[in-house]
Image: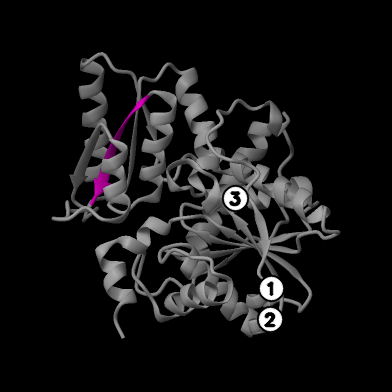
Amino acid sequence: MQLGAIKRVSLGLFPTPLEELKALSRCLGGPRIFIKRDDLNGLGLGGNKLRKLEYAMADALAKGASCVITTGAVQSNHCRLVVAAANKLGLKAYLVLAGEEPELATGNLLLDKILGAAGIYFVPKASAYTKEEKGPVEQKVEELEAELRTRGETPYYIPNGCRPLHGALGYAVCVREVVDQLFRLGLAPDCFVVACGSTSTQTGLILGSELYCQGRAKVVGISISRRKDQLIEKIDRSLGEAYGFLGLEDKTDREIIVYDEYVGEGYGLPTPAMREAVELVARTEGIVLDPVYTGKAMAGLIDLARKGYFRKEEVVVFVHTGGIPGLFSSEQMAFFQSK
């Protein structure tokens, strides 16, 4: 099956721009860094989830959904874009957020409210429960699905970050865009660098590299939450699913590259290296990164460049996955204004 034959809905402005970061590259002494601006894809202040949601929302509409339910952290970029996409398609969106409701809505949560989420539910973060048990988020989703059905609604559940298959399809298309954009400059990608959280973006970049670059462009994931062994296992499994869906034979000899040295104390918790990366890119290129995903991913790219991981003339494409509203959470604003 060809990617172009898979049903999707139009949500974003694609292809997104590809810019060369000449000043940053000079500052680091190489490699030749480009940035794929998926933060500029239009809907709901943009971000990588739009590529995935084009497939997820197409599936929801095909199944007759009247509303969607999704989950995430209180400052979830994914949830913001689910609400925006639902609005565009005439659906209602319900959010189940892991964490306590803050006194003041800032960042993504403020945008969820401005966008008019049909319901926002706060539940305790996962605590001690076994793999056989469901956590509070899963329990709330099941309760909400049942309640909505009694009201005559047809809910469609979108997992946090979207299903791996939808992410893989969306970011394989992204690679095709990059290949076309670089071809017009007489170049080809040698490496992609991306934040790795739910893994579906990196999965899609690897799939795209194998489909459109014959696997010659390596994909480096920078973990923003979990250990690399967990992420690599999930990516490998998701790639097998994507190849099966496309009716293609999966590759078994690929190297999946993930670095987990830049997480710091945990997901969403700021680090000095992240702050340096955000400020360096802002002050050399005028481009703003977010503190949770792209800031830590760029910290990884900068550190690898300083250690000589890349060749000086290597064409490295950094994927800007969005997330800028996260800068305006209370915690991040306090961090960036500290000495």
Name the residue nearer the viewer: 321 or 115: 115
Image marks 3 and 1: residues in contact by CB distance under 8 Å? no
Res 253 visible: yes
> Does the segment drawn in magenta span residue 72?
no
Count up the numbered dots: 3
Provide the residue designation for mark 1. Answer: 22
On the image, the x and y values in percent for residue 249 come to: 74, 39
Comparing labels 3 and 2, the label whose residue is closer to the camera: 2
Disc 3 residue type?
Thr
Provide the residue designation for mark 3. Answer: 203
Q: Left or right of 236: which side holds 250?
A: right
Q: Residue at x 74, y 59 (%)?
A: 217
Q: Which mark is residue 26?
A: 2
Comparing labels 3 and 1, the label whose residue is closer to the camera: 1
> Does the segment drawn in magenta span residue 94?
yes
Residue 334 in which image quadrant: bottom left
* Residue at the right extreme, as displayed: 186
* Residue at the top extreme, as displayed: 152
- The secondary element bearing badge 2 is classed as helix
Q: Which residues are magenta?
A: 91-98
On the image, the x and y values in percent for residue 284 come to: 57, 76
Res 134 visible: no
Q: Is residue 215 above or below residue 96?
A: below
Name the residue nearer the viewer: 124 or 73: 73
